[in-house]
Amino acid sequence: MKKILALLLVLVMVLALCACGEAKTEEPKEEEPAPEEEVVVEETPEEETAEEPAEEPASLSHEEFLAEEDGMQVTVLTYVQANESWWDNKITLHAQGPDGAYYLYNVECTEEDAAKLVPGTPILVTGDKATWNGLVEIQDCTFEFVDAEPWIAEPFDFAAVAAEGKLEEHMNELFTLNEGVIVDKGEGNAFFFNWDNSGEDGKCDLYFDVEVNGETYTFVVRRYLTAPGSEVYEAVKGLQIGDTVEISGFLYWYEGPQPHITSIAVK
Amino acid sequence: MKRPISLILLLAMLLGCLLLSGCHGERVDAEKSSELSFTVPESFDESRRITVTFWAKNDSNKVQVGIYRQAEEDFEALYPNVDVNIRYYTDYGSIYNDVITNIPTKTTPNVCITYPDHIATYMTGKNVVMPLEELAADPNYGLGGAALKFDSPAAEELVPQFYQECRIGGVLYALPFMRSTEACYVNKTYVEKLGYELPEVLTWDFVWEVSEAALAKDSDGKTFLINGQQKMIPFIYKSTDNMMIQMLRQKGAGYTTAAGELLLFNETTRELLLEIAVHARSRAFSTFSISGYPGNWLNAGQCIFAVDSTAGATWMGTDAPLLDIPEEQLVDFEMAVLPIPQFDPEHPLMISQGPSVCVFYKDDPQEVLASWLFAQFLLTNSVQIAYAETEGYVPVTLKAQQDPSYQDYLARAGEDNDEHYRIKIEASLLLMDNTANTFTTPVFNGSTSVRNAAGQLIENVCKSERRRQPVDDAFLEQLRTEVCSRYELKPAAPGWTAGSGASWAGDEGANEPLPATARALLLTLAAVWVLIGIVTCYSALKRKREKKKS
């Protein structure tokens, strides 16, 4: 009896240890239950919405958009004017319609769709209205293509609007500056790699100052909009203090006007 | 019959022992064993040219760039056969992406600025990151080594917490370079104007209460009484992942285990999100990604509690050496630099963060040694002190911290608004005074995703409330699902779990729950001992009865 009991006890211990040993193969089990359950949760509402087509979101005019409180979800019909580089299924767009412009930050987008977002493309965008360091924008957007005629914005005259002190009213819009003079960005440089010259060629944005109507404005070559090696990026690297330049771009805002340029030519 | 049973028992015991050792081994598999065959060369060959490529990160700060350049020059002067090539980055993400891209082609740099989370990902490649244990301990070229041409700190001269943070799975994979934490930069003037007295250590309750009080408006319903402006976000947090991590740590709640088991989606997290939602709804609270840099709002008199890194102190305050808003928008106020809000002010806890340096494996041992020497050179007083003084950083060596020149720098806080800018030095002192109260999160392949997910929970809650879409149980469940899907996370259990059981670095797994298998084993062993006890008692009683009978 004693021997049988002792044998039994040892076998129980061995079985217990076997259970412990199996833990190595248990680890991948994590993959099994939880995600599958999650998928089910996600699929249910989709099926429901499929039966009841969602209401078409009402598109706001630009004036209505500006009047909306920050944080509210907004939908606007607008037209792509330029895009920043696609990354991780997101893209950032400069968009404009006949009544105003939008900076669309982080638009959910496949790489395939990103290729279709060429200047002029009409899109219906939904996202959160936000003011980020002074820039009025739409964050975390989704979009759909709209079957309509393409539309390209006419640039406003930067110098004329600046002279009236009304640049903020044209935030995010396409502009052209017919004549400005490159001034010293600091320590005798016509431009900086990064805002304080801490960057490295090809790895950062370029900053340069332009005098317009006696006022100095900082313009930026944003590497995600006009990448290193592009005509614009390389042209700015060739600027000299005192150059008279013609510039076009979008009136980006960061605690004040800070245009992102798309072309520059020395006159 | 006797022998076969004994044999079976013996075999069973041996099998048990084998399984026991297998079971023990499972706990160690988090330690990434190195397959590198590297031996520290007996001497550094100075007769041949070696290039060391260093990918450096600065905070968009040209003074920091200058310090790197000086370090390059000084090192090359000591070791003329070494060319140091520095590539400058302004964010960790770009370095990480570039390293990942270069691993398959074996074109990683020799040395790079990094975070332990990133190293854990690099280590998924074979022979990528050098374990530094052997190099650090080498009597000639290790920390404080005899053959070094510069005054390197000995291992015991590194701040122990910071040095420990560079171990992954118990193995040294990096050297600390700079350390910072987060600080709450407070508009003390407004706090007092609202009728509150600023405590030495903020609590979350205090911050929420004052923030809500600051939302009172004039009769026009547009102008905030506290600042007379139409803009006011009383509480802005720069890094919401840090916010969630620190809140959980302070609560002793789950985040992850040391081995990477996901505990983030627990009941405490859920409660914290519901609390945050209340203040996002009232607009008392916002985040960097929604509203922009906290410092800009603070300096414009539009924020009362701005939480940002101590390494961002030079942007905080109207007298700050670096400013991002037009001068006419600056509002003068008295500022206090305090630790982040706490749940238990008697036992403050805050995150330790900041850059480290790792060395990449190369086939040529002399190249590896040169890389190690340069990485170690970054720990010398000249580099440590100069770099720390550019921001609210803290040197990672006790040697630098105790150096008279650094002590003099600290003592001169407020003498000017540039090198001795009060806020910057107070931010450094905050970390030096609280080094023992710092912690880091467990590092494993995928720890970056968990960190991102922690921040995303707060961001989405805030956005939802700002859209006037209430954060309720249904929303939180959907949020949990979305965040898991986006960051490819696999929680051990569905829903918001009740347990805590986090393993925070420094706790050495003290709070970590035992795995289910280990619990089963212990229970079974306990049952076996009970059975043995019963059998022993039964046998004793039986013997007694037989004795009586006889």
Image (cartoon, coloured by chain):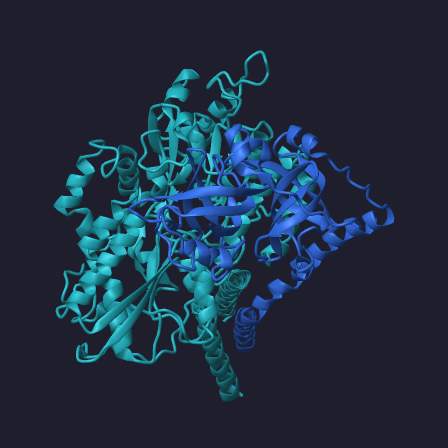
Chain colours: A blue, B cyan
Q: Quadrant of residue B196?
A: top left
Nearer the observer, A58 or B399: A58
Q: How many marks?
A: 0
Residue B242 makes an appearance in the image: no
Residue at the far right: name it.
A51
Where B46 falls versus A150 (above or below)?
below
Residue B534 versus residue B487: which sits nearer the camera?
B487
Q: Quadrant of residue B206?
A: top left
Farthest residue to the front: give it: A267
Instruction: Give the left or right position of residue B298, taking residue B535 as reference.
Output: left
Q: Looking at the image, can residue B273 be seen?
A: yes
Q: Is residue A143 left or right of residue B398?
A: right
* Residue for point 17% across, 44% down: B406
Q: Residue at x 49, y 52 (%)?
A: A265
Q: Nearer the viewer, residue B161 or A92?
A: A92
Percent x, y of residue B162: 30, 53
Residue B230, image x and y in percent?
Answer: 53, 22
Please give left or right for residue B201 compared with residue B390 in the image: right
In the figure, is residue B309 to the left or right of A113?
A: left
- Residue B521 rendering spot, x and y as whole percentages: 52, 65
